[in-house]
Image (cartoon, rainbow, N blue to C red):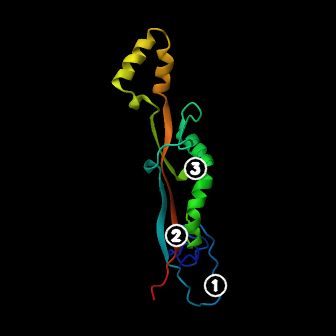
Amino acid sequence: MYCPTCGKQTPDNSTFCLHCGSKITASSDKEAQVVTEWEYKDFVIDYTQFKPRPGHAINQRDCPTLTDAAAYIWNYEQTRIREQMQSWLDEGWEPIEPIGPKCFQLRERSAYGENVTPVGWIIIVFLCFFGIGFAILLTLFETIGEATEFRVQMRRTKRSTS
């Protein structure tokens, strides 16, 4: 027997699909069940290809965990993501998993420290003697969560090639 929702094979007389959890109703007549064949494709937005802009990254002070950072970035980016995904939906693709913050791949990185030149470090160390440099050092080593990718697995019924 095949699940009418995901198309995967399940044991005969099952009431729920072992793969997707959908309820399976047994047909009273013994007609052959139609198996839906799916094709799968990932909808991906690669944020490493973009010039960083507000909303792609958030500092640890405002969002202490990567989960919080993903929720923040989702709130900022969801309209843009849905607009890009609409053409896929129009072509019959549907998401397999819920679309939201969990679809982001994030990385932690130093906010500014990796971009400071040797001359910049000398100036910061010099300013530390006057008490100003410590505040600058704290912001240089602040950790931020940055979006690297948004990925959702999509599916649609296979199109006949006749």
Task: Determine the CA span between mark 1 and mark 2.
Answer: 26 Å
Query: Residue 29 at what x, y percent from top left?
Result: 63, 90
Q: Which residue is under mark 3?
A: 101
* Viewer-side label of 1, 3: 3
Q: Which residue is under mark 2?
A: 155
**SS of the residue under disc 1:** loop
Name the residue located 45 percent from the left edge and 85 percent from the top edge: 161
Query: Residue 99 at what x, y percent from top left?
Result: 59, 57
Residue 158 sits above or below residue 76 on the image = below
Which badge, 1 or 3, is on the more N-terminal residue? 1
User: As shown in the figure, which amino acid type bears the numbered disc 1?
Assistant: Ser
Task: Determine the CA span between mark 2 and mark 3.
Answer: 20 Å
Name the residue located 41 percent from the left edge and 12 percent from the top edge: 126
Name the residue located 60 percent from the left edge and 43 percent from the top edge: 72
**SS of the residue under disc 3:** helix
Q: Residue furthest top?
A: 130
Left or right of 26? Residue 2 is left
